[in-house]
Image (tube, grey):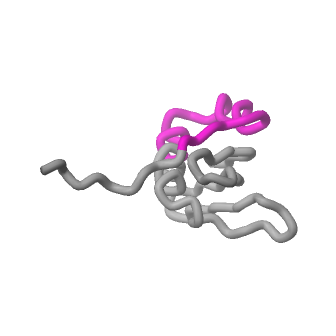
Amino acid sequence: MSPEHGPRRSQVVLVEPALSQLAKLTAAETHRLDRVIVAFSVSPELGTPVPDTLLRDYVDDVDGVRVIYYVTALRPVAIVAYVEA
């Protein structure tokens, strides 16, 4: 019998300007961002929909991280457009 697997994660892709913002983060900020990316890769609906767009805005007040992203139509890929830590 095969072991039970957890939920399938979305592939997460960062685009400009998110890559530029990522390059400016400290190691600690990048670590906090990683935890947030894992969270919404498992549950893409976590973010709040941005009205009149396909974007979602996810804010983690505990880690002090904000990510704006959208999920592709088939849900296997989340595109990160903005990061703030």
Task: Give the answer, above or below, for where 65 lies relative to 21.
Answer: below
Q: Is residue 73 magenta?
A: no
From this viewpoint, which residue is outermost toward the right? Answer: 52
Q: Looking at the image, which is closer to me, 65 or 67? A: 67
Q: Position of residue 45 (x, y in %)?
A: 59, 65
- Does residue 6 appear left or right of residue 47 in this picture? left
Q: How many marks?
A: 0
- Does residue 55 appear left or right of residue 43 in this picture? right
Q: Position of residue 25 (x, y in %)?
A: 62, 35
Q: Looking at the image, which is closer to me, 59 or 44? A: 44
Q: Position of residue 67 (x, y in %)?
A: 66, 53
| x 18%, y 50%: residue | 3
From this viewpoint, which residue is outermost toward the left? Answer: 1
| x 68%, y 69%: residue | 48
Q: Looking at the image, which is closer to me, 83 or 45? A: 45
| x 62%, y 62%: residue | 59
What is the magenta range? 11-33
Q: Position of residue 16 (x, y in %)?
A: 77, 34
Q: Is residue 31 magenta?
A: yes
| x 70%, y 32%: residue | 19
Which of the 4 image quarters holds residue 66?
Answer: bottom right
